[in-house]
Image (spheres, helix red, strand yellow):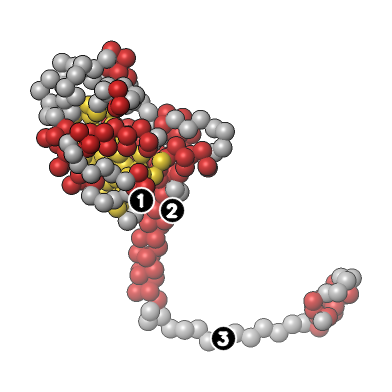
Amino acid sequence: MREIVLDTETTGFNPKTGDRIIEIGCVELYNLLPTGQTYHTYVNPQRDVPEAASRVSGITTDFLYDKPLFVHVVDSFLEFIGDSPLIIHNASFDMGFINAELERLCRDPLPVTRAIDTVQLARQKFPGSPASLDALCRRFGIDLSARVTHGALLDAGLLASVYLELKGGRQVTFAFQAENQAGQGMLVQEISQYKNREIRPSRSFSLLDEDRQRHQEFISGIKNALWTQ
């Protein structure tokens, strides 16, 4: 199953009041395994980036001056995500911004049902515990040292690791696959080594009367012993 882990950076919190997307990052998963395929682009929002947003993302108005508009990247973005489920942390936020950008271009919105919200997954699995990306990374021992500022592709990569943990993917997929491959290799070797090995004849063992008597004395002290039924 193909899934896309998606994250965006924006100029603010509300697309209805003029905030825009400034960065998109996507990581492709196939059967809960990262394929190495990613999508990343900065987007010129055609407006200034507030100082507060710049402090979070490290992206400034000047940096985005020569970057493409959303209209120039929309086709490549939609082609990359295809019809795959979208893994998003706080999905309503990112989906709201993406669909606002699509609406400006008179494009069909992405169905909200495509999104799998990792915040909800985390709250279901760990009720009452913090569900931020940082908190989940710390819970699962995922390295956060590179996250000096928020970045869409960096955060999508971190979220991919969190998602696999929430789904049991690191244990089930990575470990099982490695063990399964190793086990198959050992099995092939064992078969090749012992395929033509001479089979030993069956051996018979006799029980001494003394041992039989000791056994009878032992089970006589057990209530409803299976040996007596």
Position of residue 181 in the picture relative to residue 98 (left or right) = right
- Single out the mark in the foreground, 1 or 2: 1
Q: Earlier in the sequence, mark 3 or mark 1?
A: 1
Query: To which quarter of the image does residue 152 belong?
Result: top left
- Mark 1 or mark 2: which comes first in sequence? 1
Q: Secondary structure at mark 2?
A: helix
Q: Nearer the viewer, mark 3 or mark 1?
A: 1
Which mark is drawn over residue 172?
Answer: 2
**What is the three-letter code of the residue carrying label 1?**
Leu
* Tag 3: amino acid: Ser
Spatial CA distance of label 1 from label 2 is: 9 Å
Image coords of residue 224 (percent x, y): 86, 74
Residue drawn at (83%, 80%) of the image: 228
Q: Nearer the viewer, mark 2 or mark 3?
A: 2
Q: Is 146 on the left or on the right of 60, as rendered?
A: right
Q: CA distance from mark 3 to mark 1?
A: 48 Å
Crowding around mark 2 (Cα neighbors within 10 Å: few <14, some 14 to 19, many 20+) is: some
Q: Give 193 or 13, whichever is nearer the viewer.
A: 13
First in sequence: mark 2 vs mark 3: 2
- Label 3: which secondary element: loop
26 sits to left or right of 126: left
Query: Which residue does the image show at 41% across and 49% down from the upper left?
Result: 169
Residue farthest top in this picture = 51
Looking at the image, residue 195 lies above or below residue 27? below
Q: Could you say which disc has been placed on residue 202 in the image? A: 3
The residue pinned by badge 1 equals 32
- The label number, if any, that marks residue 144 in the structure image: none
